[in-house]
Amino acid sequence: MDSDVSERFLGGIIVAALGAVLSVVTVFDIYEDAVLQGDPLYLTLLENVVPIGVDLALIVVGSLLVIGRMPYAGFALRIAGWCLFGGAALFAITGWVYYFQILQGDLKPLVVFSHVVAMGALAGLLIGVYDGSRLERETELRVERDRTSTLFENSSDCIAAVEFVDGRPVVRRINDAFRRTFEIDDEDIVGEVIDDVIVPPERNDRAETISERASRGRHVEEEVLRLTASGEKRAFRMQAIPLETPAAAIDGYAVYTDITGQHRYESRLAALHDATRELMEVGSPDGITERAVRSVDDVLGFRTARIFRYEPSTDRLEPAARTERAGEILGDAAPLERGETVVWSVFETGEPEFVRDVHARSDTRSDVHRGDSPIRSELLLPIGEWGVLVIGSESADAFDDSDLSLSRTLAANVEAAMDRADRRQELEAQNERLETFASVVSHDLRNPLGVARGFLELAREGEPDALDRAADALDRMDRLIDTLLALARSGESIGDLEAVSLDDVARSAWSTVETDKGTLEIDVGNGADATVRADPDRLRQLLENLFRNSVEHGSTGSRTQSDDSVEHGSTSNRLQADDSVEHGSTSDRPEAETDDDTGITVRVTRFPEGFAVEDDGAGIPEPEREKVFERGYTTDEEGTGLGLMIVREIAEAHGWAVSVGESEPGGARFEFRLSEP
């Protein structure tokens, strides 16, 4: 027999025994009055009906305590103790009064009666105080239960009230958040062990450990993975909260805070960092834009994305890369003219734009795709000076704060990668120019310097023509130095682009070149068609090189690369073309005879995609055209092969494509395309 049963049995026996003793006294009183003294029976019974009822009640209560049917049977000894104490107290007070009245020889029933009443009043007072405090505690508990119930039902966290049966958490109640998140109804989980319903099989061992700790009244908090009814695994921060109320049917609560979104954000952020490292390693703008849109698809999970890259030469945002899905549903994007869409606003202000519903906006500029595009919502993010990243979704209001945050991070990383690639290309170009400088200084300058020294020695020995030959060598060095200065400036970054009149710049360039043997013709149209967006000084330097190449070599019958360009404003106009390519074989064909009175005609023309400089000279053989821009390429024994290389570098600095062809009269034609046709 355990301690609870023993306590209940002993307490019940005490109460029942007290009732039995008192009932014996009452029955004896009835017998004495009715039988021995001959009092009327009905009066005797009427006198003892209440006492006998109280005595019998004590016997009944004691019996109920013994069999466990009485409320608070767990406190049977305490109840029996108070019962004995109450009886003893009344017995003591009445016995005390009765004793002294006997000593005095004067029994006063009224006094005894009043003392009994006083004892009853005191007992009632104590019971009233106890009952009041009990009611107050019950009210507090009820309010607390109501609060707990309200919190339970209205909490955004998933809560399950559990009872531990044989150490396993059995669900007794769940709240609405639990039903929604786990996609489950009460009948599918109430009465079941919670671990059997929502724990993935591979996590059973860990779940059992958590349940074992919680069953011992410990507070447990861990990040866990749980399974919804549809089979989706979600991440939660789980708390096992014990309920320290022994009389309650609930042992505690299992509280699940859904952190799936946080985990998804963190995993996407980690993947984005990996993608950023790849972006930094790509090295080329085209490769970076292609990798960036793949990251939008692979990392951010948005299948539709484009990058528009700013082209200074055309002052437009050109489509540079797109995801496969964007190509499928949207096709090829057209270049965006300044102010044409909200994309331009994002590019110019540097502020991202979130279009929740493209179709609902009255501003038609908001949709880069236009018309009845399937795109419903867009994220437009600036990529610094490089362009704009446009992410689209076929659902309205498809992006949340985490999407915006990650997308902005990606755009910033793309900008950093583009800056890095640009600096790398500049560094490579600088290294290439340094190699050129070293080559020219170590070889081309050293040769005429040695020649000058040799002729100077001959002059000292009395050779009459030696000083003139030495002066020619020094002139050659002077031309090489001017060429190196021009090459250095060709590698500088271009300044701000502006709409430049091709007519004005061409005439200015022509005036700085010795053009006694040439004529300039300009056919560039009028108005905006007659302008190009360029750095005026660098454009003039480019034209000076081409004009000098045509005038000095085109009329001689040679196919020539001029390597002698000057900075704008240079005082040296003594440059001669060094790199000539003889028509046909350079070793067998004599130099063509020239008529100094017959000059070359140089023509500057404008066409929709760019402009051209051509002449009516001998032209450049087709096999040589791909080589004329290469560093060091020349067929002149005194040439350096830098002239047209400078032209190419200035063109590329503007973002122009340069090519060599044949003019209609058969001369050389240099085309500069400012945009794709």
Image: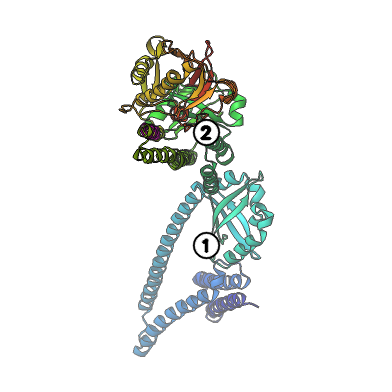
Residue 613 position (above or below residue 104)? above
- Label 2 or label 1, whichever lies nearer to me, is 2
Q: Position of residue 182 (x, y in %)?
A: 61, 46
Query: Which residue appears farthest toward the front when viewing the image?
Result: 462
In the image, residue 50 above or below residue 430: below
Q: Nearer the viewer, residue 355 or 26?
A: 355
SS at badge 1: loop
Residue that protrudes farthest toward the bottom in the picture: 103
Contact, mark 2 vs mark 1 (Cβ under 8 Å):
no
Give coordinates of residue 64: x percent, y percent: 60, 70
Most common SS among magenta residues: helix
Residue 398's label in the rendered image is: 2
**471 drawn magenta:** yes
424 to the left or right of 35? left
**Residue highlighted by disc 1:** 243
Amino acid at dot 2 = Ala
Q: Residues within 10 Å of mark 2 (few under 14, many from 20)?
A: some
Where is residue 589 drawn, in percent x and y? 57, 21
* In magenta segment, residue 380: no
What's the CA distance linking mark 2 and mark 1?
A: 42 Å
Quadrant of res 300: top right
The segment highlighted magenta reads 468-485
